Image (cartoon, rainbow, N blue to C red):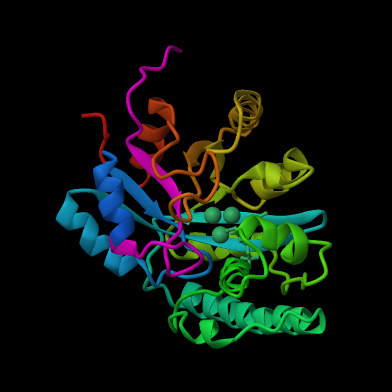
Amino acid sequence: MVEQHTSPRADLHTHSTASDGTLAPAELIARSARRGLRVVALTDHDTTAGVHEAQEAASRHGLHLIPGVELSTGVPRGELHILGYGIDPGDRALQDEIARFRDDRVLRAGRILDRLDDLGIELDRAFLDRIGPDASTGRPHIARAMIEAGVVTTVSEAFDRFLAVGKPAFVPRAQVEPEDAVRLIHGAGGIAVMAHPFSLPNPDEVLQRMVAAGLDGVETYYGEYDARQRASLQAMADHFRLLVTGGSDYHGPAFREGRELGSVDIPQTHLIRFLDRLGLPNPYE
Ligand code: AMP
Ligand code: FE
Ligand code: FE
Ligand code: ZN
């Protein structure tokens, strides 16, 4: 099928200061409007604390805001992130569970900081208190504190030298089963999508497992993926008749190449089909 090329209308994967992004929800929406986007999904890690502010900003700017969330789960060979779209932020079971995930994140951050102390890198822990009560704590917050302290110069350097798997300050997270994440998202009325599948060494195997768990879609048009990777995910999605989504995984300005807000052009037919499942209008009309 020949796809009509227009400028991107949607970004379905973004983070705000409610998790590890650097723009407040309203700033993220204002920037999206300036970029000409019609639809934005806010998909903060383990929290929906930014949704209300984003929703208000979206109505001011005439944009559609999709309430979302990104849940981190454990699989045998790595971490699987699952995006939930169109969830009801008022869903009790979802909120209770992600509140527990956030508590685990705070404990984990403390343990990472202990490791850094042992390595002679003693950071002022006040930055943890500046993360809002319903916001989620992540390694990027620690990375930024390390920059502040002059230990490293970039977030990537902090991960590469200290925070990534296998590095000296790495602490594993409490394992969440991906099937449980899909169940939580569905229970809250949402659509479950496998995020950035190539973060895993065996995406096809994991996808098969997740299809059995009721997965609805695959993030195929991911900012950092090249044409070959996208084609391979598209083929898997077609095989399992899954929805196809895409997004930049925006975490703020100047984060990484391929990760700028609204930089991913999701093919029109896939975007329309996905939005239709959420009851949203065609953004090309
Ligand atoms: P956490 O949620 O605490 O496990 O931290 C994972 C988050 O850190 C991801 O969502 C990314 O935002 C960020 N991240 C992971 N790896 C890197 C990396 N190599 N460089 C920069 N940021 C990263
Ligand atoms: Fe993140
Ligand atoms: Fe992710
Ligand atoms: Zn993300």
Depicted 96 relative to depicted 208: above or below: below
Q: Is residue 10 magenta?
A: yes
In the rendered image, residue 236, in percent from the top left (x then y), is placed at: 65, 31
In the rendered image, residue 207, in percent from the top left (x then y), is placed at: 69, 43
Residue 174 figure quarter = bottom right
Looking at the image, residue 51 sits to the left or right of residue 160; the answer is left
Q: Is residue 113 magenta?
A: no
* Residue closer to the observer: 118 or 60: 118
Where ligand 3 lies, by image quadrant? bottom right
Looking at the image, residue 208 sits to the left or right of residue 40; the answer is right
Looking at the image, residue 213 sits to the left or right of residue 37; the answer is right
* Residue closer to the observer: 186 or 231: 231
In the rendered image, residue 119, in percent from the top left (x then y), is placed at: 81, 79
Looking at the image, residue 134 sits to the left or right of residue 153; the answer is left
Q: Residue at x 59, y 83 (%)?
A: 103
Q: Residue at x 42, y 69 (%)?
A: 48
Residue 197 figure quarter = top right
* Residue closer to the observer: 149 or 159: 149
The main secondary structure of the magenta stretch is loop
Q: Residue at x 55, y 75 (%)?
A: 137
Depicted 162 relative to depicted 41: above or below: below
Residue 198 figure quarter = top right
Asked if one can make out residue 86 in the rendered structure from this viewpoint, the answer is yes
Asked if one can make out residue 279 in the rendered structure from this viewpoint, the answer is no
Task: Count numbered badges in the picture.
Answer: 0
Query: In which quadrant will I find the C terminus?
Result: top left
Depicted 34 relative to depicted 93: above or below: above
In the rendered image, residue 40, in percent from the top left (x then y), is placed at: 34, 49
The span picked out in magenta is 1-26
